[in-house]
Image (cartoon, rainbow, N blue to C red):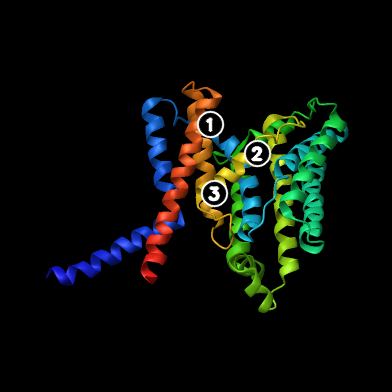
Amino acid sequence: MADATNPTGARRGAAVMQALLGAPMLPILIVAALVMGLAMPGFLGPANLKNMAWLFGPLLISALGITFVFLIGGIDLSIGSTLSLATVLAALVMRESGSIALGAAVGIGTGMLVGVINGVAVALLRFPAFVHTFGMLLTLRAVAMLITGGSSVGRLPIETLRIGRGSLLGVPNLLLIGLAALLFAHLLLNRTRLGREIYLLGSNERAAVFNALRVTRVKFAAYFLCGTFSGLAGVAVVLRLGSGGPVLGDNVLLMAIAAVVLGGTSIAGGEGSAFKTVTGAAVIVLLDKGLNQLGLSFYDQAIVLGIVIVLGSAFSNWLYHRLFVGRKS
C-alpha cells in the first residue's frame, strides 16, 4: 500500500514545487503581507493599498522592461536615467502645451529613442552592454539636469493628478497601466516568435547563431522594449506626482533589478517570465512601504531588503535544481 501511494505523493510534491517555480516569491509575499497587517492594523486598509498601487505601477513597468534584457542575458543600467529624462520632457510638454496626451507621447517617445540608441550600440555595433548603458546613465542624467537646472518641473494641468490618482471601477489607474504593460509583456514573450527567440537567445547564444536565429534583431528588440517601458514608467511617475524631475529615477535601477531577480528571472538569460517579475515587484513595494511605516532607518531597510533578495534568490535556485538538475541525476 505504501508503495502505491508514494508515487502519487511524489507527483503531488513535484507539482507543488513546479507551481512555486512559476512564482517563487508568492508565498513570501503572502507571509510578508500578513505579518505587516498584524504589526500595523491599517496596513492592508484601502487607503494604504491604494498608495502601494501608485508605487507598484511604475516599478512594475520598469521591471518588466529590464526583464526583456535579462532574458537575453544582457544588462541595461540606463533605465533610471531614461525614466528621469522622460519625466522631465513629458512634464515640460504638459506644462507648456496643456496637453497630457502630447506630454505622455513625448515621454514614451523619449524612452523609445533611448531604446533605439542602446539597441544599435549593443546589437549592431556590439559595444559591451555594461559599459555602453553605464555611459548612457551618466549622459541622460546630465541632460536632464541641464534642461531643468536640477529643479523639478511642476505647475502641470490639474487633470494630471486626477488621472494619476484616479481609478476605474475601484482600481487605481496607475495599477491598470501596469497591468496593461504586464499583459503586453506576457503575450509577447509567450505568444510571438520574438518571445520564443528571446528565450532561445538567452539560453544559448552560440546555438542561436548556428540555428540562424535573428540574433541582432532580437537583441535590438529587447533593448528597444526596455527603453520604451522606461519611458512609459516615466509618464506614470509624472501622473502620480504631478511633476517631473531629473532625480526621480535614481532609485529605479536598483529597485527594478531587485524586483526581477527576486521574482526568479535569471540574469544569465533564458529563464524567467513577466509574471515572476510581478511577484518580485510586489514584494519590493510591500517591504518598502511596510518598513517605512515601521520607522526603520534607510540603512536598516537596505539590510532587510538585501537579506530578502539573497534568501529569495536562494529559494528560487533550490527549487530549480530540485526539479530539473536533481531529476536528471
Q: Earlier in the sequence, mark 3 or mark 2?
A: 2
Q: From the top left corner, tell me how far across and down residue 133 is, in percent.
A: 75, 48
> Counting other residues with Cα less than 10 Å from the Cα at mark 2, is it few (<14), some (14-19), or many (20 or more)?
many
Specify few, some or many for label 3: CA neighbours under 10 Å numbering under 14, 14-19, or 20 or more. Answer: many
Q: Are marks 3 and 2 in contact (CB under 8 Å)?
A: no
Provide the secondary structure element on which disc 3 rests.
Answer: helix
Q: Quadrant of residue 266?
A: bottom right
The residue to which callout 2 is attached is: 252
Residue 126, quarter of picture: bottom right
Position above or below: 15 against 50: below
Amino acid type of the residue tagged 2 in the rendering:
Val
Alpha carbons under labels 1 and 2: distance apart? 14 Å
- Nearer the viewer's eye, disc 1 or disc 2? 1
Q: Is 102 or 230 nearer to us in this picture?
A: 230
Q: How many marks?
A: 3
Where residue 212 appears, as percent x and y from the top left, is 70, 78
Residue visible at 59% across and 52% down?
182
Q: Are marks 1 and 3 in contact (CB under 8 Å)?
A: no
Judged left or right of residue 301, residue 145 is right
- At a point 72% along the width and 62% down the height, the residue shown is 219
Q: Nearer the viewer, residue 181 or 264?
A: 264
- Which of label 3 and label 2 is nearer to you? 3
Q: Secondary structure at mark 2?
A: helix
Q: Is residue 3 left or right of residue 158?
A: left
Q: Mark 1 — residue?
A: 302
Residue at image mark 3: 261
Relative to 2, 234 lies left or right: right
Disc 1 secondary structure class: helix
Amino acid type, residue under disc 1 in the picture: Ala
Q: Callout 3, which amino acid?
A: Val
Q: Earlier in the sequence, mark 1 or mark 2?
A: 2
Q: Is residue 48 visible?
A: no
